[in-house]
Protein backbone atom coordinates (compact mmCIF):
# COMPACT_ATOMS: atom_id res chain seq x y z
CA UNK A 1 0.00 0.00 0.00
CA UNK A 2 1.19 3.51 -0.84
CA UNK A 3 2.89 5.22 2.09
CA UNK A 4 1.36 8.50 3.22
CA UNK A 5 2.33 11.92 4.38
CA UNK A 6 0.90 12.16 7.89
CA UNK A 7 0.13 15.77 8.77
CA UNK A 8 -0.31 16.76 12.42
CA UNK A 9 -2.17 19.88 13.55
CA UNK A 10 -5.23 21.16 15.35
CA UNK A 11 -8.72 19.95 14.47
CA UNK A 12 -10.22 21.66 11.42
CA UNK A 13 -12.91 23.44 13.46
CA UNK A 14 -10.65 24.87 16.18
CA UNK A 15 -9.82 28.53 16.72
CA UNK A 16 -6.42 29.77 15.63
CA UNK A 17 -3.98 30.18 12.79
CA UNK A 18 -2.96 26.56 12.26
CA UNK A 19 -6.52 25.43 11.58
CA UNK A 20 -6.99 28.40 9.24
CA UNK A 21 -3.92 27.35 7.26
CA UNK A 22 -4.81 23.67 6.93
CA UNK A 23 -8.37 24.56 5.98
CA UNK A 24 -6.98 26.57 3.07
CA UNK A 25 -4.91 23.52 2.10
CA UNK A 26 -8.10 21.45 2.09
CA UNK A 27 -10.11 24.03 0.18
CA UNK A 28 -7.47 24.27 -2.56
CA UNK A 29 -7.12 20.51 -3.08
CA UNK A 30 -3.76 19.72 -1.46
CA UNK A 31 -5.24 16.66 0.25
CA UNK A 32 -6.67 15.49 -3.07
CA UNK A 33 -3.38 15.76 -4.97
CA UNK A 34 -1.11 14.20 -2.33
CA UNK A 35 -1.41 11.04 -0.20
CA UNK A 36 -2.02 12.97 3.00
CA UNK A 37 -3.67 11.71 6.18
CA UNK A 38 -4.43 14.47 8.65
CA UNK A 39 -4.35 13.63 12.36
CA UNK A 40 -5.76 16.22 14.76
CA UNK A 41 -3.66 16.40 17.93
CA UNK A 42 -5.68 19.14 19.62
CA UNK A 43 -9.20 20.52 19.69
CA UNK A 44 -11.12 23.21 21.53
CA UNK A 45 -13.00 22.16 24.64
CA UNK A 46 -12.34 21.07 28.20
CA UNK A 47 -9.05 19.70 29.47
CA UNK A 48 -10.55 16.23 29.28
CA UNK A 49 -11.54 16.80 25.64
CA UNK A 50 -8.01 17.92 24.83
CA UNK A 51 -6.44 14.99 26.69
CA UNK A 52 -8.63 12.49 24.87
CA UNK A 53 -7.76 14.08 21.52
CA UNK A 54 -4.04 13.91 22.30
CA UNK A 55 -4.34 10.22 23.22
CA UNK A 56 -6.33 9.46 20.07
CA UNK A 57 -3.73 11.14 17.89
CA UNK A 58 -0.91 9.13 19.51
CA UNK A 59 -2.80 5.87 18.98
CA UNK A 60 -3.57 6.60 15.33
CA UNK A 61 -0.02 7.69 14.58
CA UNK A 62 1.32 4.55 16.31
CA UNK A 63 -0.93 2.41 14.13
CA UNK A 64 0.29 4.08 10.95
CA UNK A 65 3.92 3.68 12.02
CA UNK A 66 3.57 0.04 13.04
CA UNK A 67 1.91 -0.79 9.74
CA UNK A 68 4.76 0.98 7.88
CA UNK A 69 2.44 3.42 6.14
CA UNK A 70 4.22 6.71 6.88
CA UNK A 71 6.51 8.25 4.28
CA UNK A 72 6.91 11.59 6.06
CA UNK A 73 5.53 13.37 9.11
CA UNK A 74 4.51 17.02 8.50
CA UNK A 75 4.13 18.69 11.90
CA UNK A 76 2.42 22.04 12.41
CA UNK A 77 3.59 23.37 15.77
CA UNK A 78 3.53 26.44 17.95
CA UNK A 79 4.95 27.11 21.40
CA UNK A 80 4.09 25.70 24.82
CA UNK A 81 1.78 22.68 24.95
CA UNK A 82 1.53 22.64 21.15
CA UNK A 83 5.26 21.99 20.90
CA UNK A 84 5.45 19.38 23.65
CA UNK A 85 2.48 17.42 22.28
CA UNK A 86 4.17 17.22 18.90
CA UNK A 87 7.65 16.56 20.36
CA UNK A 88 6.44 13.28 21.85
CA UNK A 89 4.92 12.21 18.55
CA UNK A 90 8.09 13.21 16.71
CA UNK A 91 10.18 11.07 19.06
CA UNK A 92 7.87 8.13 18.38
CA UNK A 93 8.27 8.71 14.65
CA UNK A 94 12.06 8.85 14.90
CA UNK A 95 12.10 5.47 16.63
CA UNK A 96 10.62 4.04 13.43
CA UNK A 97 13.22 5.76 11.26
CA UNK A 98 10.65 8.04 9.60
CA UNK A 99 11.67 11.57 8.58
CA UNK A 100 9.70 14.60 9.71
CA UNK A 101 9.15 18.19 8.66
CA UNK A 102 8.67 20.95 11.29
CA UNK A 103 6.27 23.74 10.25
CA UNK A 104 6.65 26.56 12.78
CA UNK A 105 3.73 28.80 13.70
CA UNK A 106 3.13 30.99 16.74
CA UNK A 107 4.65 34.39 17.39
CA UNK A 108 5.79 33.66 20.95
CA UNK A 109 8.14 30.76 20.14
CA UNK A 110 11.31 32.82 20.87
CA UNK A 111 9.86 33.78 24.27
CA UNK A 112 8.94 30.14 24.90
CA UNK A 113 12.48 29.02 24.07
CA UNK A 114 14.13 31.69 26.23
CA UNK A 115 11.90 30.88 29.20
CA UNK A 116 12.61 27.14 29.00
CA UNK A 117 15.11 25.38 31.26
CA UNK A 118 18.39 23.85 30.12
CA UNK A 119 17.01 20.38 29.39
CA UNK A 120 13.90 21.79 27.69
CA UNK A 121 16.07 23.96 25.44
CA UNK A 122 18.17 20.93 24.54
CA UNK A 123 14.98 19.05 23.61
CA UNK A 124 13.69 21.92 21.48
CA UNK A 125 17.01 22.20 19.64
CA UNK A 126 17.11 18.44 19.12
CA UNK A 127 13.64 18.45 17.51
CA UNK A 128 14.54 21.18 15.02
CA UNK A 129 18.08 20.10 14.23
CA UNK A 130 17.04 16.56 13.35
CA UNK A 131 14.16 17.60 11.11
CA UNK A 132 14.48 16.86 7.39
CA UNK A 133 13.25 20.41 6.74
CA UNK A 134 12.01 23.31 8.84
CA UNK A 135 9.33 25.52 7.30
CA UNK A 136 9.01 29.07 8.61
CA UNK A 137 6.63 31.82 7.54
CA UNK A 138 9.03 34.69 6.83
CA UNK A 139 12.68 35.56 6.22
CA UNK A 140 12.82 37.15 9.68
CA UNK A 141 11.90 33.81 11.27
CA UNK A 142 14.34 31.92 9.05
CA UNK A 143 17.20 34.02 10.39
CA UNK A 144 16.08 33.40 13.97
CA UNK A 145 15.73 29.64 13.52
CA UNK A 146 19.13 29.36 11.85
CA UNK A 147 20.82 31.45 14.54
CA UNK A 148 19.37 29.45 17.44
CA UNK A 149 19.09 25.89 16.13
CA UNK A 150 21.83 25.73 13.46
CA UNK A 151 19.37 24.10 11.07
CA UNK A 152 20.73 23.51 7.58
CA UNK A 153 17.43 23.03 5.77
CA UNK A 154 15.11 25.95 6.48
CA UNK A 155 12.70 27.24 3.85
CA UNK A 156 10.25 30.13 3.87
CA UNK A 157 6.68 29.32 2.94
CA UNK A 158 4.21 32.01 4.09
CA UNK A 159 0.69 31.27 5.15
CA UNK A 160 -1.75 30.95 2.23
CA UNK A 161 -4.82 33.12 1.88
CA UNK A 162 -7.95 32.80 -0.24
CA UNK A 163 -8.65 35.88 -2.36
CA UNK A 164 -12.30 36.96 -1.99
CA UNK A 165 -14.27 39.14 -4.41
CA UNK A 166 -13.58 42.82 -3.84
CA UNK A 167 -16.39 44.62 -1.97
CA UNK A 168 -17.39 48.28 -2.11
CA UNK A 169 -16.78 49.90 1.28
CA UNK A 170 -19.25 52.54 2.39
CA UNK A 171 -19.06 52.25 6.20
CA UNK A 172 -16.27 54.70 6.97
CA UNK A 173 -14.96 54.60 10.52
CA UNK A 174 -15.32 50.86 11.08
CA UNK A 175 -12.16 49.28 12.43
CA UNK A 176 -11.83 45.51 12.59
CA UNK A 177 -9.72 43.34 14.89
CA UNK A 178 -9.52 39.54 14.62
CA UNK A 179 -7.62 37.40 17.08
CA UNK A 180 -7.37 36.48 20.73
CA UNK A 181 -8.61 39.40 22.80
CA UNK A 182 -5.86 40.25 25.27
CA UNK A 183 -2.82 42.43 25.89
CA UNK A 184 -0.53 40.44 23.59
CA UNK A 185 -2.62 41.28 20.53
CA UNK A 186 -2.91 44.94 21.52
CA UNK A 187 -6.69 45.08 21.92
CA UNK A 188 -6.48 47.40 24.96
CA UNK A 189 -4.21 49.76 23.02
CA UNK A 190 -6.90 49.95 20.33
CA UNK A 191 -9.52 50.86 22.94
CA UNK A 192 -7.33 53.67 24.29
CA UNK A 193 -6.85 55.00 20.76
CA UNK A 194 -10.58 54.93 20.04
CA UNK A 195 -11.30 56.81 23.25
CA UNK A 196 -8.87 59.53 22.16
CA UNK A 197 -10.42 59.76 18.68
CA UNK A 198 -14.11 59.45 19.57
CA UNK A 199 -14.88 63.17 19.61
CA UNK A 200 -12.88 63.81 16.43
CA UNK A 201 -14.47 60.95 14.47
CA UNK A 202 -18.09 60.40 15.61
CA UNK A 203 -18.46 57.36 13.31
CA UNK A 204 -15.47 55.44 14.72
CA UNK A 205 -16.49 51.93 15.71
CA UNK A 206 -14.59 48.72 16.46
CA UNK A 207 -15.68 45.23 15.41
CA UNK A 208 -13.65 42.80 17.52
CA UNK A 209 -13.84 39.14 16.62
CA UNK A 210 -12.07 36.51 18.68
CA UNK A 211 -11.91 34.55 21.91
CA UNK A 212 -10.03 35.45 25.07
CA UNK A 213 -10.72 38.25 27.56
CA UNK A 214 -14.16 39.22 26.30
CA UNK A 215 -15.54 40.46 29.61
CA UNK A 216 -12.38 42.41 30.44
CA UNK A 217 -12.46 44.11 27.04
CA UNK A 218 -16.13 45.06 27.55
CA UNK A 219 -15.34 46.44 31.01
CA UNK A 220 -12.39 48.44 29.69
CA UNK A 221 -14.48 49.91 26.87
CA UNK A 222 -17.12 50.89 29.41
CA UNK A 223 -14.58 52.51 31.73
CA UNK A 224 -13.21 54.51 28.77
CA UNK A 225 -16.70 55.70 27.84
CA UNK A 226 -16.73 53.94 24.46
CA UNK A 227 -18.90 50.91 25.16
CA UNK A 228 -21.29 51.99 22.40
CA UNK A 229 -18.40 52.10 19.92
CA UNK A 230 -17.07 48.58 20.55
CA UNK A 231 -18.79 45.42 19.32
CA UNK A 232 -17.44 42.19 20.85
CA UNK A 233 -18.40 39.36 18.52
CA UNK A 234 -16.68 36.24 19.85
CA UNK A 235 -14.86 33.92 17.47
CA UNK A 236 -15.90 34.34 13.84
CA UNK A 237 -14.94 32.27 10.81
CA UNK A 238 -15.96 31.42 7.28
CA UNK A 239 -18.62 33.54 5.67
CA UNK A 240 -19.18 35.53 8.86
CA UNK A 241 -15.54 36.61 8.87
CA UNK A 242 -15.68 37.52 5.19
CA UNK A 243 -18.73 39.67 5.91
CA UNK A 244 -16.91 41.46 8.74
CA UNK A 245 -13.95 42.25 6.53
CA UNK A 246 -16.32 43.57 3.88
CA UNK A 247 -17.93 45.91 6.45
CA UNK A 248 -14.67 47.45 7.66
CA UNK A 249 -12.52 50.29 6.39
CA UNK A 250 -9.29 49.59 8.35
CA UNK A 251 -7.80 46.44 9.89
CA UNK A 252 -5.94 46.96 13.19
CA UNK A 253 -3.70 44.42 14.93
CA UNK A 254 -1.07 46.14 17.15
CA UNK A 255 0.45 42.88 18.44
CA UNK A 256 3.42 42.62 20.79
CA UNK A 257 4.65 39.39 19.14
CA UNK A 258 3.58 37.50 16.02
CA UNK A 259 4.75 35.08 13.36
CA UNK A 260 2.74 35.83 10.19
CA UNK A 261 -0.87 36.23 11.29
CA UNK A 262 -3.54 34.84 8.99
CA UNK A 263 -5.86 37.69 9.92
CA UNK A 264 -3.46 40.27 8.45
CA UNK A 265 -3.26 38.31 5.19
CA UNK A 266 -7.05 37.92 5.08
CA UNK A 267 -7.50 41.66 5.62
CA UNK A 268 -5.02 42.39 2.83
CA UNK A 269 -6.79 39.97 0.49
CA UNK A 270 -10.06 41.78 1.25
CA UNK A 271 -8.49 45.10 0.19
CA UNK A 272 -8.10 46.65 3.65
CA UNK A 273 -5.24 48.91 4.71
CA UNK A 274 -3.58 47.43 7.79
CA UNK A 275 -2.30 49.10 10.94
CA UNK A 276 0.02 46.75 12.81
CA UNK A 277 3.45 46.47 14.42
CA UNK A 278 6.87 45.55 12.97
CA UNK A 279 7.15 42.23 14.84
CA UNK A 280 7.78 38.70 13.55
CA UNK A 281 6.94 38.30 9.88
CA UNK A 282 4.54 41.24 9.66
CA UNK A 283 7.07 43.50 7.88
CA UNK A 284 7.27 40.89 5.11
CA UNK A 285 3.57 41.52 4.49
CA UNK A 286 3.14 45.20 5.37
CA UNK A 287 5.62 47.82 4.28
CA UNK A 288 5.10 50.93 6.33
CA UNK A 289 3.42 53.57 4.19
CA UNK A 290 2.57 51.18 1.35
CA UNK A 291 0.06 48.49 2.38
CA UNK A 292 -0.57 50.09 5.74
CA UNK A 293 1.11 51.68 8.73
CA UNK A 294 3.42 50.08 11.30
CA UNK A 295 3.71 51.44 14.83
CA UNK A 296 5.85 50.32 17.79
CA UNK A 297 4.12 47.77 20.08
CA UNK A 298 2.54 49.44 23.06
CA UNK A 299 2.86 52.97 21.66
CA UNK A 300 -0.74 54.16 21.96
CA UNK A 301 0.14 57.67 20.75
CA UNK A 302 1.60 56.30 17.50
CA UNK A 303 -1.36 53.95 17.13
CA UNK A 304 -3.82 56.80 17.65
CA UNK A 305 -2.04 58.92 15.04
CA UNK A 306 -2.00 56.03 12.53
CA UNK A 307 -5.75 55.48 12.90
CA UNK A 308 -6.36 59.23 12.67
CA UNK A 309 -4.30 59.46 9.52
CA UNK A 310 -6.22 56.73 7.71
CA UNK A 311 -9.65 57.81 8.89
CA UNK A 312 -9.00 61.37 7.74
CA UNK A 313 -7.70 60.47 4.27
CA UNK A 314 -9.98 58.36 2.08
CA UNK A 315 -7.54 58.46 -0.84
CA UNK A 316 -4.76 57.05 1.35
CA UNK A 317 -7.05 54.31 2.66
CA UNK A 318 -8.03 53.37 -0.85
CA UNK A 319 -4.47 53.42 -2.16
CA UNK A 320 -3.12 51.29 0.69
CA UNK A 321 -6.03 48.89 0.45
CA UNK A 322 -5.35 48.38 -3.26
CA UNK A 323 -1.64 47.81 -2.56
CA UNK A 324 -2.45 45.33 0.21
CA UNK A 325 -4.73 43.30 -2.03
CA UNK A 326 -2.17 43.34 -4.85
CA UNK A 327 0.54 42.01 -2.53
CA UNK A 328 -1.80 39.34 -1.13
CA UNK A 329 -2.47 38.11 -4.65
CA UNK A 330 1.18 38.25 -5.73
CA UNK A 331 2.84 36.84 -2.62
CA UNK A 332 0.33 35.06 -0.37
CA UNK A 333 -2.38 33.65 -2.65
CA UNK A 334 -3.19 30.02 -1.88
CA UNK A 335 -2.19 28.86 -5.35
CA UNK A 336 1.30 30.37 -5.10
CA UNK A 337 1.97 29.31 -1.51
CA UNK A 338 0.68 25.75 -1.84
CA UNK A 339 2.76 25.28 -4.99
CA UNK A 340 5.80 26.14 -2.87
CA UNK A 341 4.85 23.51 -0.28
CA UNK A 342 4.40 20.93 -3.02
CA UNK A 343 7.90 21.75 -4.29
CA UNK A 344 9.25 20.99 -0.80
CA UNK A 345 7.47 17.64 -0.81
CA UNK A 346 9.05 16.80 -4.17
CA UNK A 347 12.51 17.85 -2.97
CA UNK A 348 12.10 15.41 -0.08
CA UNK A 349 11.44 12.60 -2.56
CA UNK A 350 7.66 12.46 -2.10
CA UNK A 351 5.29 11.99 -5.03
CA UNK A 352 1.72 13.20 -5.61
CA UNK A 353 -1.18 10.89 -6.32
CA UNK A 354 -0.98 9.65 -9.89
CA UNK A 355 -3.92 9.64 -12.28
CA UNK A 356 -4.36 5.88 -11.93
CA UNK A 357 -4.59 5.84 -8.12
CA UNK A 358 -7.80 5.92 -6.14
CA UNK A 359 -7.36 9.21 -4.36
CA UNK A 360 -10.27 8.64 -2.02
CA UNK A 361 -8.28 6.44 0.33
CA UNK A 362 -5.67 9.16 0.72
CA UNK A 363 -7.96 12.00 1.73
CA UNK A 364 -8.59 10.58 5.18
CA UNK A 365 -8.38 12.63 8.32
CA UNK A 366 -8.55 11.48 11.92
CA UNK A 367 -11.07 13.60 13.80
Image: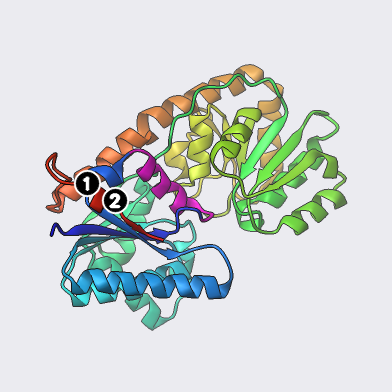
Residue 69: x, y in percent? 18, 64
The quadrant of the picture occupied by the N terminus is bottom left
Instruction: Out of 78 and 287, give the one closest to the viewer.
Output: 78
Q: Which mark is residue 359?
A: 1
Q: Residues within 10 Å of mark 2 (few under 14, many from 20)?
A: some
Circle 1 SS class:
helix
Q: Are marks 2 and 1 in contact (CB under 8 Å)?
A: yes
Instruction: Out of 327 and 37, give the one closest to the viewer.
Output: 37
Instruction: Out of 88 and 54, give the one closest to the viewer.
Output: 54
Identify which residue is drawn at 86% across, 32% down: 199
Residue 319 in the magenta stretch? The answer is no
Identify which residue is drawn at 72% across, 39% down: 206
Q: Which mark is residue 149?
A: none
Disc 2 target residue: 363
> In this view of the protein, can residue 160 be seen by the observer?
yes
Position of 353 with respect to 327 (left or right) is left
Identify which residue is drawn at 60% across, 28% down: 246
Circle 2 SS class:
loop
Query: Which residues fall within the magenta stretch?
Result: 14-28
> In this view of the protein, can residue 84 be seen by the observer?
no
Q: Residues within 10 Å of mark 1 (few under 14, many from 20)?
A: some
Residue 20 in the magenta stretch? The answer is yes
Residue 333: x, y in percent? 38, 33
Amino acid sequence: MRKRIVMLGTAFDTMGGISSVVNVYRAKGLFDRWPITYIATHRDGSRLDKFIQACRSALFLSWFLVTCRVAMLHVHMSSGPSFWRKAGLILMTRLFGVRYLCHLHGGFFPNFYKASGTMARWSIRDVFQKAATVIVLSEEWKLWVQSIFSCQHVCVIPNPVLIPPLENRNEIGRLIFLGRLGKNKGIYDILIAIAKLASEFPSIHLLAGGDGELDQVRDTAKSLGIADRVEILGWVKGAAKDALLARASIYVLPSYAENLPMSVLEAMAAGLPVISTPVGGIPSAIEDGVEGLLVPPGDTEALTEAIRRLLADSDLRHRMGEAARAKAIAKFSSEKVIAGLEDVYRELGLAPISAGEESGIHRKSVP
